[in-house]
Image: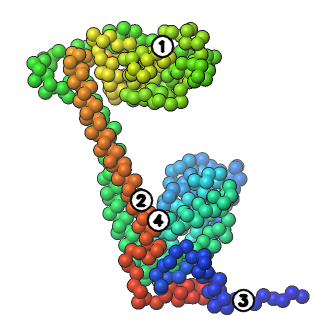
Amino acid sequence: MPKKKTALTIEERLQQALVPAEEQPYEVPENWVWVRLGNFIDLLRGVSYKKHDVHNEKMENDCLILRGGNIIEGGLDLNADNVYVDKSLVSEAQLIRKNDIIIVSSTGSVKVIGRAGLAFYDYNDVAFGAFLTLARPKNGCNKSFVDLFFQSFLYRQSIRELASGVNINNIRSEYITNMTFPLPPLSEQQRIVEHIEELFAKLDEAKERLQEVADSFAVRKAAILHKAFTGELTKPWRRENGVSDESWEEKFVKDICNDIKVGIVIKPSQYYTDQKNGVAAFRSANVRESYIEDKDWVYLNKNGQDTNKRSEVHTGDVLIVRSGNPGTACVVTEKYDGFNAIDILIAVPDSKKVTSEFLCAYTNSPACKTLISNNKRGMALAHFNVGGYSQLPISLPSLPEQHEIVRLIDELLARERAAQQAAEQALVSIDLMKKSILARAFRGELGTNKASEASALELLRQVLAEG
């Protein structure tokens, strides 16, 4: 008869909980200890359900089931392609509670595996699915401190090391419970949490203001273009040059172009060849708002080029997207003279009436995009045709004023783009600052630690005794 296993003593359990010196990632303050994370969290597996159990709309007795798409770094998205099941399939323990950490534990994406979202509230109708794992901080430690660990570089590094070792698709429970966790005294945990919350609150306030700057670029751009094509932007210029405010003429696009045509539409792929033996052809993907995307070209063989001479483009032509994002326009520069075009509009401006840059800028303006949207054909494909573009109305100033308008647009938009880019770079810096703060926090480098406090070893001993 096998011998009955004897229960481990507190000291034996203490030795199991502590991380050997050779496995400790770095030094921490003397009154901290390195422990196995599993001593401070309980792990729960998600709700299992059948396909026929799922509701796409919430019923009276339903529970929202979180899936991988609901998990974002540091939070939860409760509006991401949600599914619901009856609460009878969900245990009380599987309902999300405040301070729970929900981890993507099964996925085909190395980037997503291990992503940890935090719950900031108790929910009586939100649980989590079988491809997720829930880590619930135990009593005896500061739960917010444990939450912060799952957003730290140390946690992400541990996940990356696991993911780089093999093509990991699943995080086993022992991967998490065996992670090394730097444990400070309980009072230090509280000070760290309070200090981080204070710092993060200031950073979030700055982030909100910067995000407004970044997000409002489109609004500011639309305002500039509205002023440009209503004459307000160049009103001072007209005063200085003795030009009447009544000098603008109402035209249609067809009145100011020598030709408006469309690129190859019927089976262009029959002409495809390699770069060495062909001529590059524009597609919608190459036409961006006022610039050319110089990549992902297709090439036409000699027969395709000879057969489709009419769709050949030349310097100064304005190219306009027909489908996907109709109305997006750019000007052909000298570098692309002689290229061909596939399923895009080609406008050949009459240089005596309109500059290419003015026509392009007008076509890209919100006012013109609205007209295009209202006049496009083939609504299912958002397709835009020659007739629709030809009939677009345009208010036309003199050529010198057109040049001034384009100059001002370029100058003002460059300034706005610089402000947007500066805001976006600052937003990245804020995220990096948060990561740096967390890294310092779990090294005991925030300046909050008190060396005179009792070692966290006593806290560990207490938690083990209560467990």
Which residue was labeled with disc 1? 312
Q: Position of residue 265 (x, y in %)?
A: 55, 15
Which residue was labeled with disc 4? 120
Mark 3 or 1: in front is: 1
Q: Residue at x 42, y 59 (%)?
A: 432
Q: Nearer the viewer, residue 275 or 98?
A: 275
Q: Amino acid at mark 1?
A: Glu
Of the numbered discs 3 and 1, the one sitting upstream in the chain is: 3
Label 4 crowding class (10 Å Cα cut-off): few <14, some 14-19, many 20+? Answer: some
Instruction: Kindly state the secondary structure of the residue where label 4 is placed.
Output: loop
Tell me the distance, in whole angstroms, between the alpha carbons under discs 4 and 1: 59 Å
Above or below — where is 228 with respect to 390?
below
Tell me the distance, in whole angstroms, between the alpha carbons under discs 3 and 1: 85 Å
Instruction: Kindly state the secondary structure of the residue where label 1 is placed.
Output: loop
Q: Amino acid at mark 4?
A: Phe
Of the numbered discs 4 and 1, the one sitting upstream in the chain is: 4
Of the numbered discs 4 and 2, the one sitting upstream in the chain is: 4
Tell me the distance, in whole angstroms, between the alpha carbons under discs 4 and 3: 37 Å
